[in-house]
Amino acid sequence: MSREEVFGEISKILQTVRQDPSYLNYWHAYKKIQNLARTIEIPERRGVRIALLSSFTIEPLVACLDIECRLAGLNPEIYVAPFGQYSQDIIDMNSRLYIFKPDIILVAIDAESLLKDDFFSNFPKIGEEEKRIFQNEVIEHLTGLISKLTSQTNALVLLTNFIVPVFSPFGILDSKIVLGLKEFFVDLNTKLCNIYRESRQVYVFDLEGLAAKHGKERCVEAEMRFRGSILLSRSFMPLVAKEIAGYVKALKNLTRKCIVVDLDNVLWGGILGEDGFDGIKLGSDPVGKAYVDFQKLLLSYYNRGIILAINSKNNYEDAMKVIREHPNMILREKHFAAMRINWKDKVENMIELAQELNIGLDSMVFVDDSPQERERIRQALPQVLVLEVPSSPFRYAEALMELNDFNTLAISEEDKLRGEMYYAERKRRDLMKSVSNIEDFLRSLDMTAEIRYADSFSVPRITSLINRTNQFNLTTRRRTQVEVERICSEKDKYLVYSMRVTDRFGDEGIVGVAIIKKGEKEWIIDTFLLSCRVIGRRVETVLLARIIEDARRSGVSFLIGEYIPTEKNQVAKSFYSDHGFKFENEEQGVMRWRLNLQESTVKMPDWVKVI
């Protein structure tokens, strides 16, 4: 089969899992794809290496995890530590775990393997002090292993918490006992969360929450447990794999940034053109309350930094009257970064929305009650994730919450304000239409650029930009927060800049990042990126001019700019030539441009105040 035929066959196989995500379908799909995948070469950027370390048999999870990664467009390699040897793998610096060089490591250790054999049977006789000692032993064991692990690898570490038992020998009196059996494990889980709350490398994987969602009595199959030490049931494993895939997507920058919604039968019940302002269902009856509930969920996403947009076939003025004046609307005009309310083809509208927001179609999720419109978008724009909207509005919120495509590894204050920033951008576009040229527009903004070296406060935002910016990103080199922190600490080798931009419409937050590799006579711009929110305001020149000023003060003679072309960063391809750099060479896909600081410079734009 040709490469295209292989991908077509894999796509068909994956579709069976989408339609019926049972363990049996995961397993069959895994076996078939394993054979097909060997016949083609996958680009390295689509690869992800996952290690599973466990105190119980975890091999059956591999099939589900492999398929979940492939559903996200990734080609996974998965390493499983030998049974019962997770500690040896972590402690031995030469173990196969470290040779494998994983991107993500799941550490799943069950409680029974950490406590004495008679812990559960003797629990009613154990006093509070002895229970605390047991807890401390468990914590010390786990934190010791995780410390060793993080000292040897930069991989993202997922440490599973403990499933709180449903049964207690105390029965209905468990909550009356100090550190009853359930409280014992709840307390352990809380301690683990507190220990790793500030860590950017270690995340507590909420196995307890997943088990509660699935039904704890369905999470383990007794026969599989006793015969094969398999502690995850076949019905539970797809859920666990999907949750892990949420971290994988966040790490591989596959996060969706924008939810695009229809209006009729999505934000409110009924057809506005037929039912009118007073006839739509919104808040006053059970059906109307379901739409209000869905809007509240969308608002929670907006408040954590997901962009909202509208793509609806409707009369603009009628729809805006509802959005602006209906007493039960939760989402108002200010919550939408862009709107297409017209009678045009929704595919055309989606493309325009992506262009207006400066984001890729692969960053968007489309929500529409019409199966025909959903299929139209799926076929015309396969990059867009189309939510399979249930027929009943009572299940809308549940369907959206099932998506694991909005996860990020950190949320900065700038992220939380993203919706407001995009609304301000709409106001800037309105202003631009009223002035005659771009320079008058830029001067009218009263911009201020605050350029600083990275510190502990800005590193999370810098990491987020490094991993999420695609368009004005000269090299698209992705880095974890641990790697960024390491670079920031090596001040003799690197300089890491952040640039914050404000104007008359508001504070954009940190929107520019540059990482400089320092040499005695030559500095190399390893990373240079700009948030899509400020593309077109020429603030990239401000950051570059500041780097040049610093280089001159340090006695540097040459500044080298690197550019690695991608499908998405063409907007930045002439950045160095536009600023007087001379093309030097291209090696292994990296184009290098040189600026002689003794002969050339870049002037600081006079329409920006720099502090």
Image (tube, helix red, strand yellow):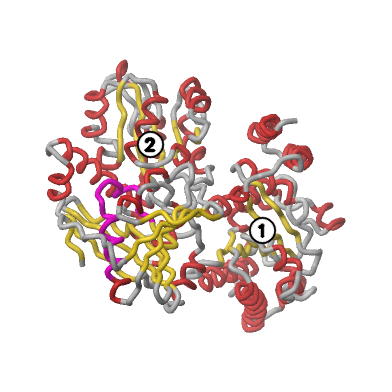
Q: Which mark, residue 354?
A: 2
Spatial CA span between label 1 and label 2: 48 Å
Q: Which mark, residue 275?
A: none
Q: Quadrant of residue 315?
A: top left
Horizontal relation, residue 198 to residue 170: left or right: left
Q: Main secondary structure of the magenta part?
A: helix
> Which of the two discs, 1 and 2, sits closer to the camera?
2
User: Residue at horizontal 63%, vertical 34%?
Assistant: 18
Residue range highlighted in magenta: 529-549
Q: Front-most of 151 and 371? A: 151
Residue 312 at x, y = what percent? 35, 26
Q: Quadrant of residue 183?
A: bottom right
* The magenta stretch spans residue 546: yes
Horizontal relation, residue 579 to residue 217: left or right: left
Query: Does the rendering let one see residue 138?
Result: no
Residue 363 at x, y = what percent? 45, 42
- The residue that mark 1 highlights is 166
Q: Quadrant of residue 322?
A: top left
Q: Front-most of 204 and 517? A: 517
